[in-house]
Image (cartoon, rainbow, N blue to C red):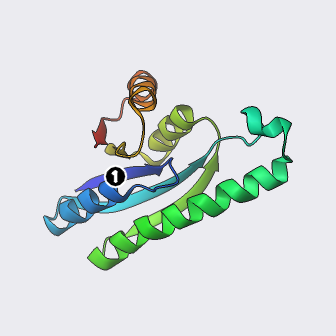
Amino acid sequence: MLRLLIPVVHHDGALQAARHAAFLFAERCVSEVELVEVLEPAEQGRAAAFHSRRALRFRQELEMLSALTQTCAILDDAGVPYHWTRVFGPVAETIAARAAEKQSDVVLVDASHLGFLSRWWILTKLWRLTRTPVTMLQ
């Protein structure tokens, strides 16, 4: 039985990854799912020059809450046991560290809403940083 790590890195959530995890759970391949909401530091980027960090963090958390709610709803409907955590830091490094910490068998990344360069950047960095197999869903 596999332990999956599903990072939520985009404000559209990890819906494809949650659906895939629900399918694998129905096929008795998955024992547990770890949802990791990855929030990048608010002080990075151009918006920090024009808005307070607090306002940026609030907006980011609000967007990600909607994404996480949708992702959790899919897992709840399928009866998949999961744990949820929120982690702050750079995306690839944070996912790799969490996969090692939780001893995940597979990292399941939903890349359906990411652009080509973002997809490529995250995937290559994850392959370099972790020994855990990484699967990208599109």
How many marks can you see?
1
Residue 63 image-quadrant placement: bottom right
The residue positioned farthest toward the front in the image shown:
50
Residue found at x 65% / y 39%: 89
Residue found at x 43% / y 26%: 117
**In the depicted structure, whether residue 67 falls above or below residue 47:** below
**In the depicted structure, whether residue 132 falls above or below residue 55:** above
**In the depicted structure, whether residue 74 falls above or below residue 9:** below
From the viewer's perspective, is 104 left or right of 102?
left
- In depth, the one of 55 and 36 nearer the eye is 55
Q: Position of residue 84 (x, y in %)?
A: 51, 63
Kindly identify the amino acid type of the residue bearing the numbered disc 1: Leu
Residue 20 image-quadrant placement: bottom left
Secondary structure of residue under mark 1? strand
Q: Callout 1: 10 Å neighbours few (<14), some, many (20+)?
A: many
The residue positioned farthest toward the left in the image shown:
27
From the viewer's perspective, is 71 left or right of 45?
left
> Where, quadrant-wise, is the N terminus in this rendering?
bottom left
Q: Position of residue 14 (x, y in %)?
A: 40, 55
> Where, quadrant-wise, is the C terminus in this rendering?
top left
On the image, numbered disc 1 is attached to which residue?
Answer: 4
Residue found at x 31% / y 78%: 77
Residue found at x 65% / y 63%: 62
Q: Position of residue 106 (x, y in %)?
A: 31, 44
From the viewer's perspective, is 39 left or right of 128?
right
Q: Position of residue 75 (x, y in %)?
A: 34, 70
From the viewer's perspective, is 50 left or right of 72?
right
